[in-house]
Amino acid sequence: MSTATPPRTVATVTSERGELVLQRRADGALELRVNGVFVMDTAQTSTERALAHAALDLERPHRVLVGGLGLGFTTAELLRDPRVRSVLVAEIEPAVLVWMTDGTVPGGVQVVSDDRVRVQLADVRDVVADQAPGSLDAILLDVDNGPDFLVLDGNAGLYREAFVRTCLVRLRPGGVVVIWSSTESPDLESALAHAAGSYTKRCHQVDLAGRLETYTLYSVTRSDL
Ligand SMILES: C[S@@+](CC[C@H](N)C(=O)[O-])C[C@H]1O[C@@H](n2cnc3c(N)ncnc32)[C@H](O)[C@@H]1O
């Protein structure tokens, strides 16, 4: 018989996309689930932070767009670097912003109240489309578990060639689009190669409470245009 302590629900909300649950596990970590599917936790955040570093590796990471906010680790990592002047965060779930603002997520308020941060409650597709051509240094996309393990079916288009092209146009030459994925995805690789000519793939091994997984960060650079 298992003696594992079940997680304790910290907050829950139902939106038009389904049920969001923030729960506290026995190991003390907070975990975000959407429609019962694991989205992220506060115990293993190395790839959320590595996503930020893909922008910080640029010589000039001044203006960055992040999709989505989640529990704020990518955005917090960007803010540690004084070269970052503005971070526009697209977040589709209003409850996530509330939990980051009202103290439910420890440290959240420092992230969202930083003068350089603006959170727009909208689909990242629309937020990207609204940006002026050539106006961003990096677009960092971590809105779902990747194209082959979607939490929200409506996010499938974010991993296709047309949206990657839309992102590339919003970058200044030399800027990067970086996409987090829980799996290596041949379809995404093909979309990136068609949109940008080439792509870079970095695989990160992560330890999820004793279970090893490999997450992938894909990036493309706006070269000439
Ligand atoms: C994995 S979490 C992001 C984790 C984040 N990188 C961090 O460091 O905490 C995914 C977030 O994207 C949001 N999201 C999902 N689909 C979205 C979309 N189409 N546009 C904007 N945000 C979206 C979810 O509500 C969730 O907060």
Image (cartoon, rainbow, N blue to C red):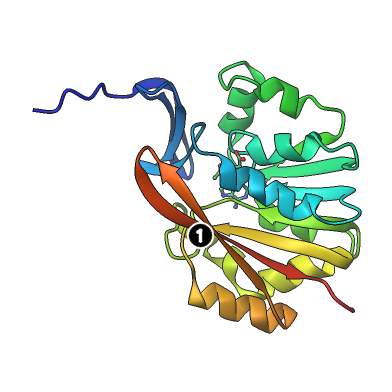
Q: Quadrant of the C terminus?
A: bottom right
Q: How many neighbours does mark 1 have within 10 angstroms: few (below 14), some (14-19), or many (20 or more)?
A: many
Most distant residue in the top direction: 103
**Does residue 129 appear left or right of residue 94 in this picture?**
right
In the displayed structure, 106 sits above or below 190; it is above
Q: Is residue 35 visible to us here?
A: no
Which residue shows up at 68% across the image and 52% down it? Answer: 124
Q: Nearer the viewer, residue 67 or 76?
A: 76
- The residue labelled by disc 1 is 146
> Looking at the image, how many numbered discs can be counted on the residues?
1
Which residue shows up at 91% across the image and 42% down it? Answer: 83
Q: Position of residue 52 (x, y in %)?
A: 71, 47
Q: Quadrant of residue 202?
A: bottom right
Q: Quadrant of the N terminus?
A: top left
Q: Secondary structure at mark 1?
A: loop
In the displayed structure, 203 sits above or below 15; it is below
In the displayed structure, 12 sits above or below 210; it is above
**Does residue 207 appear left or right of residue 92 in this picture?**
left
Q: Ligand 1 is in which quadrant of the figure?
A: top right
In the displayed structure, 58 sits above or below 44; it is below
Q: Is residue 114 visible to us here?
A: yes
Which residue shows up at 59% across the image and 33% down it? Answer: 71
Q: Nearer the viewer, residue 136 or 97?
A: 136
Q: Position of residue 142 (x, y in %)?
A: 60, 51
Q: Position of residue 34 (x, y in %)?
A: 43, 41
Q: Quadrant of residue 2?
A: top left
Q: Nearer the viewer, residue 28 or 166?
A: 28
Q: Nearer the viewer, residue 102 or 190?
A: 190
